[in-house]
Image (tube, rainbow, N blue to C red):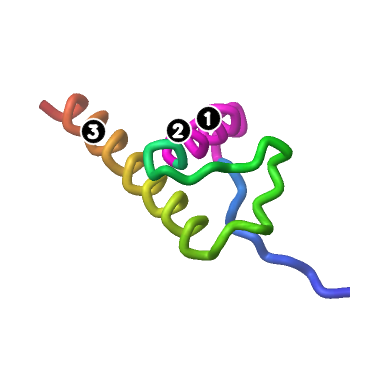
Amino acid sequence: MAQTNSSNNLVVTKASAALEQMKYEVAQELGISIPQDGYQGNMTSYENGSIGGYITKRLVTIAEQQLAGQYQ
């Protein structure tokens, strides 16, 4: 049986709810509706990639703001 080597493990496990909420906020901003049942198999790769890309962009911005405040 093959082992999976996933790097998608959260460093801060308590952040999962905030990340989930961010996913829905970003999707709404982009005009993409995520089904209520959570199944995203009918969504295009472009839609899922857009959501993930914007989440990453927002997380980097938040981190930069925190670092800038820390090192002033």
In the picture shown, does residue 33 fall above or below 41?
above
Kind of residue at disc 3: Leu
Kind of residue at disc 2: Glu
Quarter occupied by residue 10: top right
Q: How far apart are marks 3 and 2 (CA)?
A: 24 Å
Q: Give the range drawn in magenta.
A: 11-26
Q: Mark 2 points at which residue?
A: 25
| Tag 3 secondary structure | helix
Image disc number at residue 40: none
Q: Label 1: few (<14), some or many (≥20) within 10 Å?
A: few
Locate the N terminus by quadrant. bottom right
Q: Label 2: few (<14), some or many (≥20) within 10 Å?
A: some
Residue 59, horizontal then vertical, whole percent = 36, 40
Q: Mark 1 points at which residue?
A: 21
Q: How far apart are marks 1 and 2 (CA)?
A: 6 Å
Q: Is residue 10 left or right of residue 55?
A: right
Kind of residue at disc 1: Gln
Q: Residue at x 66, y 58 (%)?
A: 42
Residue 23, horizontal then vertical, whole percent = 50, 39
Q: Name the residue under label 3.
A: 67
- Asked if marks 1 and 2 touch (Cβ < 8 Å), the reply is yes
